[in-house]
Amino acid sequence: MNKKKLTAMILAKLEDDLAQTVASVRATVEAATHEESKPENEYDTRGLEASYLAAAQSKRVAEMEELIAICKNIELKEFKNDDKIAASALVQVEMNGKKSFLFLMPKGGGFIFNLDGVSVQVISPVSPLGEALLGMKSGDTAVVETGNQIKEYEILSVE
């Protein structure tokens, strides 16, 4: 599977999300500073709430910019099945007879892409599954505890 193509897809998604978020920030800042947002009385907090939202959205913009920088600069290592899983590994796992592909980014994740007809989920080391996979290799079994449920992922291949 082509990891360069996958990272290009991730980058395009992040840049699109960033553009939408920046537009939302502009609209929220405008709402927060618009004269209609001035409080009508001591209990009117519309302007204050809009300013809090704008601050949170600005923080999200900074996080997205960091993810874009990571994606642009990630070193795509070519793994062998006996290599330990680390960032930029494309891992095929099987759980309960269902096979799936996972791409480990240093940060971010939560996306699913269709790459050459194959579904690939992007995860990070801070996710329970990403944390469980780190340092494992082909043939190992990653165990993830979620609440009162234990899931076992057999690692089929590492690219």
Image (tube, rainbow, N blue to C red):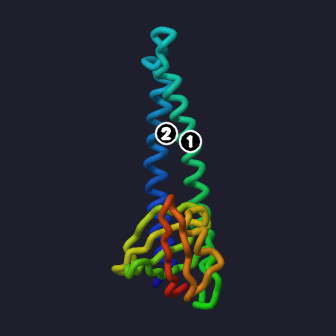
Number of numbered tags placed on the structure image: 2
Among the two numbered marks 1 and 2 on one chain, the one whose residue lies closer to the N terminus: 2
Position above or below: 81 against 90: below
Q: Which percent across, then down, holds residue 111?
A: 45, 64
Q: Which percent across, then down, holds residue 117?
A: 34, 80
Position above or below: 20 against 115: above
Rendered residue at 62%/69% (across/down): 73
The residue identified by callout 2 is 25
**Amino acid type at image mark 1:** Ser
Position above or below: 104 against 109: below
Rendered residue at 49%/87% (across/down): 156
Q: Quadrant of residue 144?
A: bottom right
The residue identified by callout 1 is 58
**Residue 159 shows in this picture:** no
Q: Residues within 10 Å of mark 2 (few under 14, many from 20)?
A: many
Q: Quadrant of residue 131?
A: bottom right
Q: Which percent across, then down, holds residue 135?
A: 65, 78
Marks 1 & 2, CB-CB < 8 Å contact? yes
The Cα–Cα distance between marks 1 and 2, rounded to whole angstroms, is 7 Å
Rendered residue at 55%/85% (across/down): 158
- The residue lying toward the viewer, choosing from 134 and 78, is 134
**Amino acid type at image mark 2:** Val
Rendered residue at 52%/83% (across/down): 155
Q: Residues within 10 Å of mark 1 (few under 14, many from 20)?
A: some
**Residue 87 shows in this picture:** yes
In what element is the residue under mark 1?
helix
Position above or below: 109 against 47: below
